Image (spheres, grey):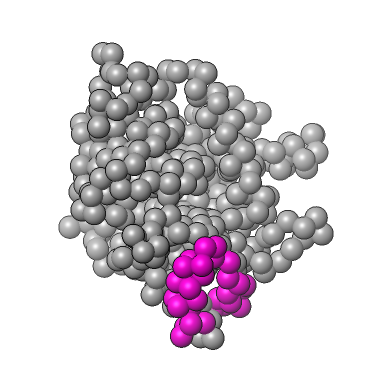
Amino acid sequence: MLANLPPLWVPDRVAPLVATLDRGLRFTFANAPLQRLVGSAVPLAGGIVTLLDVVVPEDISHVLGAIRRLDIDSETVVDIRMRSFGGSNAYTRFSMHATSATHPIEMWGLDVTNDQPLRARLAHSNRLVELAARVTGCGIWSWDLTTDAFALDTRAALVMGTLTPRSVATIAEFAALLSPQHHDTFVESVRRDLDRGMLDLTLRLNHGVDVVLAGEADARDHRGRPLKASGVLWGISHIDPHGRILDLATIDELTGLANRRAFDRAMRAECRRAVADADHLSCVLIDVDDLKPINDALGHLAGDNALRSVAEHLRRSFRNGRDVVARWGGDEFAVLLPGIDAARASTTIDRIARQLRDQPFTVSAGIAELAAGDSPGDLLKRADAALYRAKQDGKSCVRRDEPPFGRLTR
């Protein structure tokens, strides 16, 4: 495989990044340079972390598109921004090679973070992709028809009204979110449309919202039957006067983040999961300091821009498909961090707060970790109390609440 790579890929005093993925895009192997680049405390090759977990949200669409174009023994080159849990995102360029049914994708690449012209082209392209997703409210789904594994990105999960993207792992679990009128015919209808070419279905969810599921087969067998499929999903619960599609049930219109309703639903589910698994769960409440004076002095447009700026920093700083980032209301934001303790959460929030200090505003934050005996309401109250202390201590700082009865982890 390496002999077929273009000259750009020949490493010159640069450690190559090497990985293999299974059919669910989970890492089955990741070499040490890739593990260090991502900086995750969880081993990439442990069968838990997927490629989409370490890709910035804005890049998921074109990464899935590249994978969709792969056939056995084919190869493609794709530029990916990877989430580095220890700091800034890394810019990488990978050659992807489809191999066998056991390990269908091999990846070999380099960290090109210092290639400034390439970074500029990537940033421009990804801004356009993110703008398109934000305006339309579209999310991304994928389905492996050979295993029935089904995946949603964060936007698609919000549209569906699910708790987190991880709440849906199979096509049957996705179908369970639909109105009973679809239960008997949904899977058959999807397979039939994929057989014919393009999937385009309008579906009603259990809570009454209509959604459109569109996509196509990514790979077919020798008889032309679909093996893998992916596409987009959007809600049509409301269309504003300008013709933009909005899902008012779960999306905050100003920032494009989850709204409070979606966050509350995710909070209840993740608290149950954390208790069952004896795992960490941290909640962060973030407040934009002195937003009212900004509105009074510069107008509400300036205040809205401040909120959008904070939302964008938060969106880029957390893990797509795991963390839940929401606008809590007014000038407050909320973040739910499954599997993350309060100390790690504090490090990340401190970094975000420092990054925002070059703006004409600052933020304060309160962090709490789920404790034994905590309800979702208790966790929120402790995060809110920590935020209050941050405000009392002069603002522009982060305060952490200690669990009163000990942490959940074994």
- Could you say where residue 387 lies in the image, as x and y percent from the top left? 50, 47
Q: Is residue 406 visible?
A: no
Task: Tell me residue 159's x, y (percent).
Answer: 56, 63
**Can residue 1 be seen from the camera position used here?**
yes
Give the residue at x 21% y 34%. 31
Q: How many marks?
A: 0
Determine if the magenta segment contains residue 190.
yes
Magenta range is 182-210
* In magenta stretch: residue 215: no
User: Looking at the figure, which quarter contains the N terminus?
Assistant: top left
Residue 299 in which image quadrant:
top right
Q: In the visual, does 408 lie left or right of 310?
A: left
In the foreground, 205 or 96: 96
Residue positioned most to the top: 13
Is residue 28 toward the left or the right of residue 73 in the image?
left
| Residue 256 percent coordinates (x, y) | 61, 51
Residue at (28, 13) in percent of width and height: 12
Does residue 81 sit above or below 237 in this rendering?
above
State the image quarter where residue 30 is shown: top left
- What residue is rendered at 30% in x and 66% in y? 147
In the rendered image, the vertical position of residue 330 relative to residue 307, given as above or below: below
Residue 137 coordinates in the image, percent (x, y): 62, 55
> Which one is in front, 71 or 389?
71
In the image as oriented, which residue stretches furthest toward the front?
223
Q: Is residue 363 above or below residue 231?
A: above
* Rendered residue at 39%/55% (across/down): 219
